[in-house]
Image (cartoon, rainbow, N blue to C red):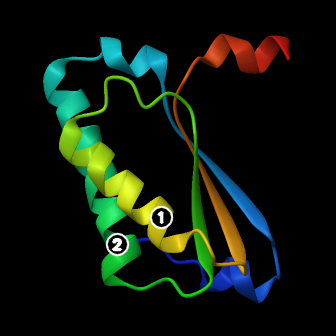
Amino acid sequence: MLRFSVILFFKFSTISFFAFSTENWTRPKIEVAYLMGLLERTLDSFTTQKYEGVKLIWSGRKKLLPTKVLKKLEYVINATKNNKDLVVNFNFNFYNYLFYIN
């Protein structure tokens, strides 16, 4: 699903994805469920594709995440914590307004 080879080729050390702001919780439930499934598949790709050297960090609130997604997230963060080639900062469930005032 995710391809980091180009990012690693150019020797970037960190990349951030702004994936889901708190405003997204107000979307129709079917859309939120789809986005949670997309997040789950993305987390699965970290374990199935064995992104060597890629470390996942999480920025944002974990509150409201489905338990299944939260468990996968914690697993991937722990499994990749010692990787040093690339840090992938996943910004999820963040409050958009704070980014504008800081």
Category of crowding for the residue at label 2, using alpha-carbon neighbours closer than 10 angstroms: few (below 14), some (14–19), many (at least 20): some
Residue at x 53% of width, y 72% of height: 80
Front residue of 50 and 67: 67
Which type of secondary structure does the marked residue at label 2 adopt?
helix
* Residue 100, position as x, y percentages in the image: 78, 16
Which type of secondary structure does the marked residue at label 1 adopt?
helix
Say the numbered circle drawn on residue 78. 1
Category of crowding for the residue at label 1, using alpha-carbon neighbours closer than 10 angstroms: few (below 14), some (14–19), many (at least 20): few
Residue at x 80% of width, y 71% of height: 13
Query: 20 left or right of 15?
Result: left
Q: Is residue 85 above or below residue 68?
A: below
Q: Quadrant of residue 40?
A: bottom left
Nearer-N-terminus badge (1/2): 2
Which residue does the numbered mark 2 point to in the structure image? 45
Q: Residue furthest left?
A: 30
Front residue of 4 and 94: 94
Q: What's under tag 2, amino acid-wise?
A: Ser
Q: What's under tag 1, amino acid-wise?
A: Asn
Front residue of 70 and 10: 70
Disc 1 and disc 2: Cα gap in Å?
Answer: 15 Å
Query: 4 left or right of 48?
Result: right
Front residue of 47 and 36: 47
Q: Quadrant of residue 70?
A: top left
Residue at x 71% of width, y 83% of height: 8
* Residue 50, position as x, y percentages in the image: 42, 85
Residue at x 28% of width, y 50% of height: 71
